[in-house]
Amino acid sequence: MTEAGPIAAPNSGRPFGIASLSRVALYLIIVVIFATPYLWIAGSTFKTRQDLFDDLYPVSVKTFLPSNPTLENLTGLFTQTNFAQAFLNSVLVAAMSVTFAVTINSMIAFVLAWLKFPGRRLLFLVILATLTIAFEAKLIPLFLTMQQLRIDNTLPSIFLPWITDAFIIFLLRQHFAELPQDLYDAAIIDGCSFFRMYWQVMLPNIVPALVSAAFIKFIFSWDSFIWPSIVITDESKTVITVALAKLFSDEYIRWELVFAGSFVATVPVVVIFVFLQRYYVQGFVRSGLK
Amino acid sequence: MAQIFSNSRNAQRYRAAFLLSLPALIGLFLFHYWPIAETVRLSFTDYKVFTGEFTFTGLKNYDLARSDPILLLSLRNTALFFLIKVPLQMALGLCLAMLVAKPGRDSTLLRTLILFPAVTSMVVASIVWGMMFHSDIGIVNSVLESLGLPTQGFLRDKHQALPVLASITIWKDVGLSMIFYLAGLLAIPTVYYEAARIDGAGRWEVFRYITLPLLNRTHVFVLVTSTIAAFKIFVPVEVLTDGGPSNATRVIVHYIFHLAFRFNRFSYATALSVILAILLIAISIFQLRITRDEDND
């Protein structure tokens, strides 16, 4: 709290002053709160069921480190449950969501940024207005529509409703609009068509924003739970979050599998995040504060 | 610029623009505007489970909602959840942002760690914290016992369940609040701080009269977005408590979800969806207005 603002007090030079000690303590508390769940998931994934329960009382280093490491939980997860299928489905749904969302939203974002036509501000506002209605308020007609189109219980029915995304349109329009007029004029003089303007001139210049949009959509898709649990009834089409919640709600909970499932659902995303963190943060910051 | 092109060139451009916009326009219509209109329409009907037909019944569903004790309870619990979660998340988000604003390796690492929950599934976050707070086999009670403190019921205690759920969602969402505050902090020109230092302002005064007011736009943004998120709380309730114990965690989206997809009461559920949507818009407008008024003071 006291280290307010970007110009924080410089270190006093004494490595073990009261201030630096309290700072270390504060860091430690934060690390414990944010890291413990991950360490517990990771450690427990490689423990036998017996060790899992034995190591809980009292909590010690052993709680987070397997003393007899085993891969049984992971192999059990993939052979005795439908988790492998659910994982694959989640990957497919995320891949489709990202591909379609980035393509479709960037196209209209480009038009909104670079075509001067009457009513373009109005169109932009009408698109942004969709952000005010919660997805949760549209679940029932969306579900009935999927039934009427007879595509409920299919993987496309999961990602179709969230491909068009006003948030991404907004984010990408901002980036398109900030590209220099010279770029546009030069391409026009070269006889560039409007479509090639989008595809070959403008799009390559906003790649970082595209990565932001893609990663944010990926996280959204990977995290989604309520919609897939409604529109999918077939076990073979289920996604990872629904499969995990089901594992957790069984009459006889197989805790060791729940840990292994949480591990599998979390590790890929966190690893990707470590590399794409900058894009993720930029995507939110740029669209949030303008 | 425009006059150097022939009309056919312009027509070509508009055609290309139309084709580029078309997929998104179709998507917006099919999956945004149409379902909203349908939600409103269905809220004035009655759904017959056996025939699958919707018959017009006027305001019946809304009359029903006015005297529905569980709806009232859900709204009360949702409001309570919002009151616990949002102020805490904003305060913690700001504190963490100030902590990691200092450039350096430890700040970068801490920032990454605090953002891990943001990219972790809400289902995973719910499950792992649900197990940590488990009253019999949870780590938290194990630690309490080792310290000689009384163990707690947590999710099985009707007074503790909602605050525990709020803590879990704060853990998950505080990273993003921190990021917005961090961006806000870094946008404050350093001259303000330098001037304050020359004037001999203490750290608290600098915080109270420079940092806090200059973050006003960030406060508004974080307040509105986290409020909307709080009112849509669903996943931890569905995964961990299913509305219990004794309805202590029954919240609005969970109630709508169960009316529709467990009891097939589609029409009544759409009426509650309309109420939820209007409520969210009203709260957002209200928050924007009061914070704007403060701006003008």
Image (cartoon, grey):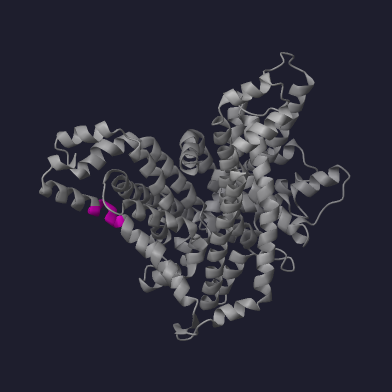
Q: Does B22 appear in magenta?
A: yes
Of A243 and A219, nearer the camera is: A219
In the image, is residue A86 above or below residue B295? below
User: Residue B279 at what x, y percent from top left?
Assistant: 57, 64
Identify the residue shown where x is 77% and y is 41%: A59
Q: Quadrant of residue B268?
A: bottom right
Of the 4 image quadrants, the one containing the N terminus of chain B is top left
The reply to whether residue A30 is in sight is: yes
Residue B246: % across, % down: 74, 68
Q: Position of residue A271 (x, y in %)?
A: 51, 37
Left of A43 or right of it: where is A234?
A: left
Q: Residue at x 71, y 66 (%)?
A: B244
Q: The magenta stretch spans which residues?
A: B18-23
Q: Nearer the viewer, residue A186 or A88?
A: A186
Hey, which quadrant is residue A119 in on the image? Answer: bottom left
Q: Nearer the viewer, residue A277 or A73?
A: A277
Q: Residue furthest right?
A: B148
Q: Is residue B287 magenta?
A: no
